[in-house]
Image (cartoon, rainbow, N blue to C red):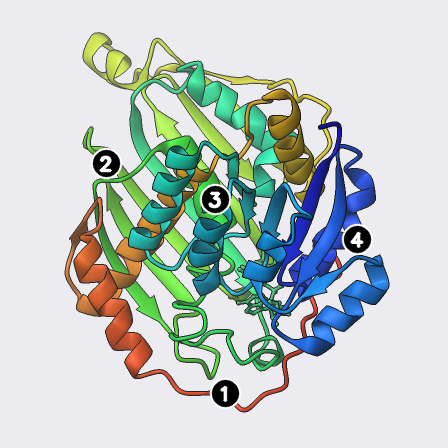
Amino acid sequence: MNVVRLGIIGVGGMGSGHARNMPRVPEAELTAVCDIAPEALQAATEAYNVPGFTTHTELLDSGLVDAVIIATPHYFHPPIAVDAMERGIHVISEKPMAVQVSEAEKMIKTAEKTGVVFSVMFQERTRPVHQAAKKLVEEGRLGPLYRAQLVDAHFRSQAYYNSAGWRATWKGEGGGVLLNQAPHGMDLFTWLAGMPSKVIAQVNTRQHIIEVEDEASALLEYENGAIGYMLESVNESPTGLRIELCGEKGKLVLDHRGLHFWEVVPGVRATSDGTDQMWGHPEVNEVEVPLEERETGHAVIVRNVARAILYGEALISPGPEAIYSLELANAILLSGHTGQPVTLPVDRAAYDAFIEEKKASSRDKDVEDQRITDPNHVV
Ligand SMILES: NC(=O)c1ccc[n+]([C@@H]2O[C@H](COP(=O)([O-])OP(=O)(O)OC[C@H]3O[C@@H](n4cnc5c(N)ncnc54)[C@H](O)[C@@H]3O)[C@@H](O)[C@H]2O)c1
């Protein structure tokens, strides 16, 4: 195989974005599309001149694809991924990989069993600053973690929420900001800081007429005793991501200005324990972190997966790592709605029961589906 034959399942806003990006991926060609909505399917078959199918199983059984991108609303990611994997078809799932961790585990287990390449679309990982931050953490430059903080501010209008029946409903989306806008920031946060072991959270619906949360905040505890704080919101402007990680030997800050790193000599605790000076401080040196020049964006993940299939290239965003941000989102929703602390890993049965209860209370929305992704977003 020289070129991976790729199908896209769900050609709405994001799926169409992936289709338009295909010229950036010489290792793959778009060979089929699928959408349950005839108008979306027709638009895609005409635009990209490929066969179209109204069910994902027809596409998977067509013999036309080696791999698929799943860009449907979130609840469909796990069943479609499992159906693809069972047929030996490689999978890129859009984020979040699932609504519930129990479903995410089925995807991971099926990928392991079938040996297919499985990746989740966390394209933010491709940015040079994020790769450089990960390298600092992996090299142990922060030392043991003392504090982790994430502030991930987004803006969404009521018109956005009125743009599709599935958005911001329990039965269509299974959560609000935590399931839709937060996964990228929370993926970076858990990729860099690791997983907390306990969460105490609050969720609110402040500025929108929706069933689910438009704001979530949480206090986190880590196994080593470190603490963390988080905010996810769609109620702010200007928007932006800020991650702070403070450790014994260094402090890292990622924000809209880039990546900053300070090394602390000989260390925070080492100085506290070791100095006999009343106003003694550790030596703090800001260190310039070299950034690799690299391509970024969605197409880089697709290209990486194609190269993983063709040449065994290591995945930038492996499927099994995508469960971390979902695990945290599930823990925050459960804690926020029960008012109780939640320990991680989340109790799968308890979370499934919580979602079933919420889905039962969910209402249909009388809106017209628009299928338009933020034009500034798809690269
Ligand atoms: N990686 C990113 O940065 C990013 C950006 C935007 C959206 N997304 C993700 O992409 C997914 C889709 O979001 P969107 O904004 O494109 O939504 P959308 O409503 O614009 O498009 C979804 C499409 O899926 C189709 N569909 C629904 N159920 C289907 C099924 N069972 N089989 C086949 N097609 C089906 C719909 O008819 C629609 O055309 C979501 O999971 C979202 O979180 C990711």
165 to the left or right of 360: right
- Give the secondary structure at mark 1: loop
Task: Please say whether residue 237 is visible from this viewpoint.
Answer: no
- For marks 1 and 3 on the same chain, the one whose residue lies earlier in the sequence: 3
As measured in the structure, the alpha-carbon distance from the residue carrying label 4 to the one carrying label 1 is 30 Å
Residue 281 in percent (x, y) is at 34, 17
- Ligand 1's image quarter is bottom right
- For marks 4 and 2 on the same chain, the one whose residue lies earlier in the sequence: 4
Residue 247 in percent (x, y) is at 34, 24
- For marks 4 and 3 on the same chain, the one whose residue lies earlier in the sequence: 4
Q: Which residue is mark 1?
A: 365
- Give the secondary structure at mark 2: loop
- For marks 4 and 1 on the same chain, the one whose residue lies earlier in the sequence: 4
Q: Residue furthest left?
A: 340
Q: Residues within 10 Å of mark 1 (few under 14, many from 20)?
A: some
As measured in the structure, the alpha-carbon distance from the residue carrying label 4 to the one carrying label 3 is 25 Å
Q: Residue at x 57, y 24 (%)?
A: 132
Q: Which residue is mark 2?
A: 222
Kind of residue at badge 2 = Tyr
As measured in the structure, the alpha-carbon distance from the residue carrying label 1 to the one carrying label 3 is 33 Å
Q: Residue at x 45, y 87 (%)?
A: 364
